[in-house]
Amino acid sequence: MTASDPILSVRDLTARIVSRKQIVDAVKGVSFDIARGEAVGFVGESGCGKSVTARAIMRLAPEGTRVELGGSVHFDGQELLPMSEAAMRDVRGRRIAMVFQDPMTSLNPVITVGAQIDDILRRHTGLSGRAARARTVELLDQVGIPAPAQRADDYPHQFSGGMRQRVLIAIAISCDPDLLIADEPTTALDVTVQAQILRLLLRLREERGMSLMLITHDFGVVAGMVERVNVMYGGRIVEAASVDDIFRAPTHDYTRALLAAVPRLDRHGVAP
Amino acid sequence: MSDAAIFSLAGAEPAPRRRLRPTAGRLLLGLGLVMLTILVLITLLAPLVAPFDPSATSPQSLEGSSSQHWLGTDAIGRDVLSRIIVGGRTTLFITFTAVSLALLAGLVLGLLSGYVGGWVDEVIMRILDVIFAFPVFLLAIAVVAALGPTVPNLILTIAIVYTPAMSRVVRGPVLSVKKWDHVEAARSIGMSEWRIVTRHVLPMVVSPIVVATSLTLAQTIFTVTALSFLGLGPPPPDPNWGGMLADARQFMELAPLTVVGPAAAIVFATLTFIVLANGLREVLDVGSER
């Protein structure tokens, strides 16, 4: 294996979501690579399969459903799809971590944020007691929580949305994952806070050399964040290009439609 | 959501701990706790508190209240107050043990069927539905009559009778909590399912379970005394509240205290857990789904 091998290589990935009521082919053959240290954006409308693709990589199924996966997910020399559930649990959180959309509900409301970070450290790094505590405070500091030693003992409801998203990011980076999947990490946040969170993700990625898979429906978010963009529609990648090319010369009609849908201040027209 | 909750979400600053104001719920909970303390203390210290040996007979039968026998004596001259105090041990022991067993079974079955879902859920709930479909007393009488009226049988019977209700109380909230984002987030960091259940699901459903347990205790006291009254309780001569009522009812006109005493004890114990349950419900902010 060389350094130029992609950390993640997905080929013909399919995901069929089977629930009691219906069967949905959410991802219909998706292929892409993410290089080491690279940031790749996935853009598309709701229901285009971008979140399911991310969860398929981590082999997470929406509650109450079963997901049948096909194709291959090659991660750092390992094939993830045939792996046992126990082996997969060692990958989740340690090698591949995820930041979720809604920071208000993604933390356990009855456990202090410090204890929630301790949990993942104990699970994957073997740190415990005072060492885990020190690392927790350090992580909270790295994601920009003021007075981290005191705030570690606070409960999620004592944090604002942006601060909670920082906590979730602290949990995600706690075990130095190789790949961070951020699923609409700023959608639930105010615009000003969005910018702070994106800057934080950008900084952490550079400091740690993590790869980043950034999922969003907002072209404004990918602009300064990623090198390459995959545009998804109807469970397929319809356009894959560098971020510059996407903005300068979108080739696919759907990409053009998406870009046209971004509201602009310098143009008159009906507000979306 | 209450105004207070919205307010505490809005600020990033940690809210200063406010002093607890005496709301109706807190007063109710306080009253319930005081009553529970009295009940538990008297029961635990029964041999020390009781003025007489509860089984010692005397020639003074069916006496009224006196400075010696506060609640009089029964048909064979035993002190009614002492029998109530010591009899509470039997009744409450059966109640607590049975409800603990029902709670344990309810937790296991409710978590299993709620969290695992699918056919596991179907099988467990259908079996419990069958038990649920029987009237409580009919089922209890049938089982005790079949197995024989001993204390262990009584405990087992009552535990079986209340297991379906406890399982349902656990299962309901588990069904919704398992869909919450923090459960998926826990899964995404590699937590095992066992750890997710114990750390991220169970703590969220504690409140309704606590309230339901307290209510079940109240019901069970009633069930235990009723079964004892019907002669399916623990065998004599050890006193218990239901049995005392049954013995005394023939002499109700002659010595009303022999009936009023144990009846009052049953009412007090039942009321304790009802008051406690309502106080807990208010304080823990449990929705009134039941």
Image: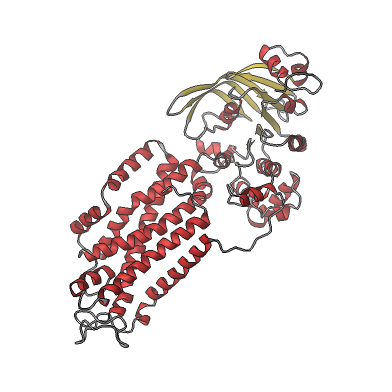
Q: Residue B182: x percent and y percent?
A: 57, 42
**Is A76 drawn above or below residue B137 in the view shown?**
above
Q: Quadrant of the C terminus of chain A?
A: top right
Judged left or right of residue B37, residue B225 is left
Its colouring scheme is secondary structure
Q: Residue at x 49, y 51 (%)?
A: B286
Judged left or right of residue A93, residue B225 is left
**Is A18 drawn above or below residue A176 in the view shown?**
above
Q: Residue at x 47, y 70 (%)?
A: B34
**Is A98 drawn above or below residue A241 in the view shown?**
below
Q: Quadrant of the N terminus of chain A?
A: top right
Q: Image quadrant of residue B112?
A: top left
Q: Residue at x 65, y 43 (%)?
A: A171
Of A153 and B82, nearer the camera is B82
Of A222 and A125, nearer the camera is A222
Q: Residue B285: x percent and y percent?
A: 52, 53
Residue sitting at the far right:
A266
Does the image show residue A34? no
Q: Residue A15: x percent and y percent?
A: 53, 24
- Number of numbered labels in the structure image: 0
Does the image show residue A267? yes
**Is B224 drawn above or below residue A25 in the view shown?**
below
Of A175 and B82, nearer the camera is B82
Residue sitting at the far front:
B253
Q: Residue A148: x percent and y percent?
A: 73, 52
